[in-house]
Amino acid sequence: MNYANIKYRDIADGEGVRTTLFVSGCSHHCENCFQPETWDFCFGKPFTEGTEREIFAELDKSYIAGLSLLGGDPFEPENQRALLPMLRRIRE
């Protein structure tokens, strides 16, 4: 999976201060999409174990209220293969 961007202190995409992961890849190609560059599954940077560690480190901060997943489309099967294991670890 690739990702387009990570916002570590985001106040626009959920309640409170959040970490937001913008994944790459979307097969819907909605008309008037505001980020059509994220339709490409190869756009951005590879999502690695290091990327995941950075996200976990941010989520450990007391002022972070949670993780928001945006895109692209986090529900694309290609993205779920990387996201579901991470989300399970976050819930633990």
Image: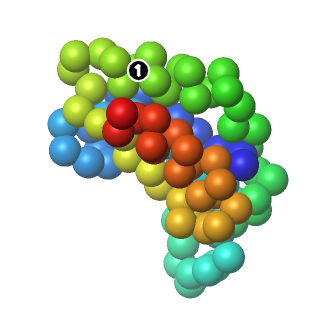
What colour scheme governs how the chains and residues are painted in the rendered image of this protein?
rainbow
Q: Position of residue 5 (x, y in %)?
A: 58, 39
Asked whether residue 42 is in view, the answer is yes
Q: Position of residue 57 (x, y in %)?
A: 44, 17
In what element is the residue under mark 1? helix
Q: Is residue 18 left or right of residue 5?
A: left
In this view, the residue farthest toward the right is 42
Q: Amino acid at mark 1?
A: Glu
Up-down relation of residue 84 to residue 91 (above or below): below
Which residue does the image show at 30% across and 16% down from the upper left?
61
**Disc 1 target residue:** 58
Residue furthest toward the front? 92
Left or right of 10 on screen, residue 38: right
Identify whether 44 is placed above or below 71.
above
Above or below, comparing residue 75 to residue 52 in the picture:
below
Front residue of 31 and 9: 9
**What count of labels does the image hold?**
1
Point out residue 14 in the picture as x, y percentages from the top left corner. Answer: 26, 48
Q: Quadrant of the C terminus?
A: top left
Q: Quadrant of residue 85?
A: top right
> Is residue 36 visible to us here?
no
Q: Residue at x 54, y 59 (%)?
A: 74
- Residue at 27% x, 26% y is 64
Image position, residue 15 (x, y; %):
19, 44
Query: How crowded is the residue under tag 1: few (<14 C-alpha within 10 Å), some, or many (20+)?
Result: some
State the residue lying farthest toward the bottom: 31
